[in-house]
Amino acid sequence: MIPAIIFFAAYHIIRLISMHLLRRKLIKAGQYERPGILDEPKVTEENDRYPSLKWGLVALMTGLGFIVIDLLKLFDREWLSGRDAVLPIGILLVFVSAGFLIYFFIMNGRKVKQ
């Protein structure tokens, strides 16, 4: 976890410094109206209309995945225990992706109705 945090912090510090230097170069070159082109693109309504719905569905499906994993332990512990057991990871990934797919189909259904 610590290397990931260090990498994340270093990335953002380097990005901040490079964006500052690029903006400064644009201003020095007389391109006063151009520094805005380096800004992050705004998230539009089309891209992410209901973020609460999306992450709520993903959290719900993740929880269901954990419940299924726990229920499978009742039948046979050997499937899900040990260092080499990948079944729990697979089950969890299937449920998380199902949450994203449900969100996708809900959004496409709303788009067709409108």
Image (tube, rainbow, N blue to C red):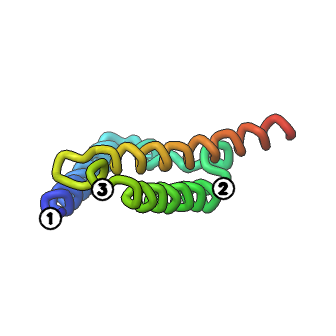
Tell me which residue sits at (30%, 48%) in the image: 79
Give the mark toward the camera: 2 or 3. 3
- Describe residue 5's horizontal placement relative to residue 93 as left or right: left
Residue 33 shows in the view: no
Check if mark 3's residue and mark 1's residue have beta carbons within 8 Å: no
Give the mark nearer the N terminus: 2 vs 3: 2
Secondary structure at numbered mark 2 = loop
Give coordinates of residue 69: x percent, y percent. Answer: 41, 56
Secondary structure at numbered mark 3 = helix
Provide the residue designation for mark 3. Answer: 77
Q: Amino acid at mark 2?
A: Tyr
Task: For marks 2 and 3, give the CA distance.
Answer: 39 Å
Q: Quadrant of the N terminus?
A: bottom left
Question: Quick one: label 3, few (<14), some, or many (20+) residues within 10 Å?
Answer: few
Q: Amino acid at mark 1?
A: Ile
Provide the residue designation for mark 2. Answer: 50
Direction top: furthest residue = 112
Give coordinates of residue 3: x percent, y percent. Answer: 13, 59
- Describe residue 29's horizontal placement relative to residue 99 as left or right: left
Q: Which mark is residue 2?
A: 1
Secondary structure at numbered mark 1 = helix
Tell me which residue sits at (86%, 40%) in the image: 114
Tell me which residue sits at (55%, 44%) in the image: 98
Give the mark nearer the N terminus: 3 vs 1: 1
Task: For marks 3 and 1, give the CA distance.
Answer: 32 Å
Task: For marks 1 and 2, give the CA distance.
Answer: 32 Å
